[in-house]
Amino acid sequence: MNVLDVAQNSVAAGATLIRITLEADEEQGLLTLTIADNGKGMTPETLAHVTDPFYTTRKTRKVGLGLPFLKMSAEMTGGTLAIESEVGKGTVVTASFGLHHIDRAPLGDVASTVAGLIQCSPDIDFVFTVRAGGEEFCADTREMREVLDGVSFAEPAVAQWLREFIGENTQPILQRSNII
Ligand SMILES: Nc1ncnc2c1ncn2[C@@H]1O[C@H](COP(=O)(O)OP(=O)(O)O)[C@@H](O)[C@H]1O
Ligand SMILES: [Mg+2]
């Protein structure tokens, strides 16, 4: 849910490339989610208020608790939320969670989440990377696009293939590291 919500912000910001990285660091005991986009970015003013759910002037915030909720989820597990953003350049949201903290929400079905995201925004490029236990998997829609030769990621058969492809490659890595 967090991934969807935050990545949706990148889509809304007009990003053409969104990088989603999930990295487990056993030594530090942290699970880090990074969502980086090349969208329109935020002004320092927006950035200053974006994690405050009680910011009421509603000039910059319309609805939703995406980032405040992510911040709360991260901090509940002894982690942190950091946001870097520059107007015209893009935004990087980094949420770290206590890997083995009892309050860390289960990771859920990341493969379906990411595949669904790609299916819903078939013209945006995504790079999804999972890193854990010295292993890495990376799915890059720019490379897949060449193979697809014009067939859309919105095509149900393509979306299903993508979900299976991501799932088959990320689940073993996450399982071997006891993340799922
Ligand atoms: N990646 C991003 N790029 C540009 N602006 C962003 C990004 N993420 C968040 N924002 C800004 O912060 C606001 C708050 O985001 P969020 O907490 O997810 O709530 P909502 O998306 O419902 O407005 C957004 O409306 C947008 O103005
Ligand atoms: Mg949002």
Image (cartoon, rainbow, N blue to C red):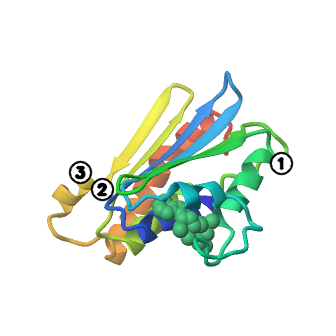
Labels in figure, total: 3
Q: Which residue is mark 2?
A: 141
Disc 2 from disc 1: Cα separation: 33 Å
Pick the quarter of the image with the N terminus: bottom right
Say if residue 105 shows up in the picture: no
Q: Which residue is mark 1?
A: 103
Neighbour tally class for label 2: few under 14, some 14-19, many 20 plus, Cα within 10 Å: many
Picture residue at 59% right of the left edge, 40% below the top: 174
Q: Amino acid at mark 3?
A: Glu
Neighbour tally class for label 1: few under 14, some 14-19, many 20 plus, Cα within 10 Å: some
Q: Which mark is residue 143?
A: 3
* Quadrant in the rendering for residue 14: bottom left
**Residue 134 against residue 149 in the figure, above or below:** above
Is 90 placed left or right of 104 in the picture?
A: left
Query: Callout 3: helix, strand or loop?
Result: helix
Q: Position of residue 138 (x, y in %)?
A: 39, 43
Looking at the rendered image, the disc whose residue lies closer to the viewer, 1 or 3, is 1
**Residue 153 against residue 27 in the figure, above or below:** below
Is 168 placed left or right of 126 in the picture?
A: right
Picture residue at 45% right of the left edge, 34% below the top: 136
